[in-house]
Image (cartoon, coloured by chain):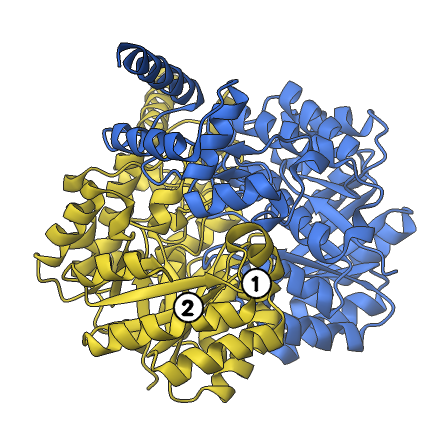
Chain colours: A yellow, B blue
Amino acid sequence: MRSLAILDSTLREGEQFIKTFFTLEQRVMIVRLLDRLGVTFIEVPSPVSSPETREAIEAICALNLRSHVVAHVRCVEADVQAALDTGVYGLNLFFGTSNELRSYSHGRKIEQIAHDAVPLIRRIREAGRYVRFSAEDAFRSDLVDLLTVFDAVVDAGVERIGLPDTVGIATPRQVDRLVSLIANRYPNVGIEFHGHNDTGCAIANTISAFEAGADCLDVTVMGIGERNGIASLSGIISQLYIHYPDLLAAYDLTQLVELDQYVADCLNINIPYNMPITAPSAFTHRAGVHTKAVLRNPHAYEILNPTDFGVVRHVDVGSRFTGRYAVGHRAVSLGLQLTSEEIAQLTQALKERAERGSLNDEEVNTFILAWYEEKGSLVWER
Amino acid sequence: MRSLAILDSTLREGEQFIKTFFTLEQRVMIVRLLDRLGVTFIEVPSPVSSPETREAIEAICALNLRSHVVAHVRCVEADVQAALDTGVYGLNLFFGTSNELRSYSHGRKIEQIAHDAVPLIRRIREAGRYVRFSAEDAFRSDLVDLLTVFDAVVDAGVERIGLPDTVGIATPRQVDRLVSLIANRYPNVGIEFHGHNDTGCAIANTISAFEAGADCLDVTVMGIGERNGIASLSGIISQLYIHYPDLLAAYDLTQLVELDQYVADCLNINIPYNMPITAPSAFTHRAGVHTKAVLRNPHAYEILNPTDFGVVRHVDVGSRFTGRYAVGHRAVSLGLQLTSEEIAQLTQALKERAERGSLNDEEVNTFILAWYEEKGSLVWER
């Protein structure tokens, strides 16, 4: 079995999301939950960001988690030294290699990038720490430029190279091609992928990178990050659960919902409905065709088992699209015994009521019981 | 240039989202906005759902939109007749072909599915309407079963066949393989794809289907639908904008944000931060490395031009990760002339303040002006 490391960057990339501001207490709680879940790496910002960030990093390192704490650091001597002065397991160096970033971010030529990075990598290795080098904006970088830099950093002793899709431009096919090429050229180092979501393909691109040879995948809780964020932890876990379940053997999947909910609370937002597994709607079924089949066998419209994540399925009965099977099922659960004809009448009545607005579970129950009572009194009157 | 139809199913799939209840007025407003944007098809529920739904469909047909209105209808005689009795352009028939849906949804054998569908397709064609047949849960269906049904419906005269990933299990690679195979076997009919998001790949799968030969892609506004929904309109537009811009020539992209915002308001939710183009954060930049480059040239960290969508970029200056370039830029915009040394001091002061919580634009401006004033008075005192 291939090994796979998940790197969670909620404290680094996730703090670049406009709504994020984590206190020290929140940072500590998040890494505790990530550690319980079982991620391999926890990425933190550069300690030069501020004295408070450096103190938070020290506090996190002092927790002695199973997860490795790695700092995301510019290829600048002062930044590297500051990170080495903390207790982090390793450093994730980054340097923009595309024309766009070379021109408008740091202004360095390709030769200078390698020249700046190599001594820092040697120094980190000599200090006995893990080191990764990422070519920021790899998917807009010229291939010769990319390989020139990677040749140099691999030669200098990096343990992993990173291919971030910094601007969210890549397609799964492009990721497959580039990661395969890089994996063939550098068989003795690991490969990391970091995918932004500007065109909605962050999760697909990240899984494509794994299938092409990447062994470390970047995520954040709920995918928060710059602009539209990156691949979400729950999205990547849903993919692994379906296609590579053995890779999740050491994970405690029941932590996932609590983790997403905790970060959502920190940000004062709801978990988005499009978040696999953890969205409140992820295991909710509405249309009559769906609810009928799911009540007979959930696998009909569910490929993930909610109980594996400590989540409860919800069958919505109170919409204008409700169906007889689900309504009859609910009536039985309320202790009513109805004929097929009665279920059809009740469904019709409920649909008519739902045309003035959907009903929640409690309202549905109240409606059904009231309908039954009224019907009984009508029968009585006859 | 290949042609591509976008089918919006906000009024059908989108109403299966737990939070959705559209009034007639809202349904009409949504289709007007979709029509202005330029989608090819607008999918509505089956008119047998309720008298109110049938009336809404009639009202929408009476608008005489450029977009074609198509009804999503079971392969049941009464449902087909009810749809033919409205003014819809065509019918989208569906029938579950996987073992899971055959066993727990409708209980029909494969031969029965073809037997039920063929006379209905002939009838719709004879009525002069467009007809598509979808094999629900195509990606868990046995290939022989799938081809048996498609052979029969293509022979019966359908104009398009549909391959929905009903449970969100497919990968871009699987979509590529199955759609390619189907496109080769049935060169004279169109192919539609409908991708659910349970494992986070709806957008990537939908684009993969197009690249493999599909000519009609299903979306909803913000991707709302059963469970985690389907591909979002803005996600598919972001993909086409980057990779196939000619296909968007007839679209009015400035309608997109208004449309997403309108539906979000109907649902009483915010547009999720992970929504390409339309999320308030989609063109927001925070980290110092990012803001510096974006202020020099937005293309450094933006692959979509916000002005093409009538949206304004936002450079966040008030976080703990702010940088000197962005702070200096803001100071200039406030009419202040500062030396490099002063900008460094101001940035330091702002970062310290932001460690107690991020500042919004107005608070940043107030902070900078107060800092400048205080500094001036200090100089004065010296």
Residue B44 picture location, percent across and down? 68, 38
Question: The residue tagged with tag 1: helix, strand or loop?
Answer: loop
Visible in this render: residue B206? yes
Q: Which residue is mark 2?
A: A116
Classify the position of the N terminus of chain B by image quarter: bottom right
Residue A99 as seen in the image, left or right of residue A49: right
| Of the pair A222 and B177, the residue shown nearer to us | A222
Q: Tell me the subunit letter for badge 2.
A: A
Q: Position of residue B164 (x, y in %)?
A: 62, 59
Residue drawn at (45%, 62%), measured in percent from left and top? A95
Give the residue drawn at x 33%, y 19%. B371
Left or right: residue A9 versus residue A194 is: left
Q: Chain of mark 1?
A: B
Relative to A109, B209 lies left or right? right
Amino acid tagged 1: Asp
Mark 2 surroundings within 10 Å by alpha-carbon count, few (fewer than 14), some (14 through 19), many (20 or more) = some
Say which element carries label 2.
helix
Q: Amino acid at mark 2?
A: Asp
Crowding at dot 1, Cα within 10 Å, few <14 / some 14-19 / many 20+, comes out as many
Tell which residue pokes out farthest to the front in this image.
B382
Tell me if residue B235 comes above or below residue B177 in the rendering: above
Q: Please name whichever residue, B171 or B325, is drawn nearer the observer in this view of the structure.
A: B325
Residue B343: give x, y in percent of width and height: 40, 32
Q: Are marks 2 and 1 on the same chain?
A: no
Q: Which residue is mark 1?
A: B137
Q: Which mark is residue B346?
A: none
Residue B22, by quadrant, is: top right
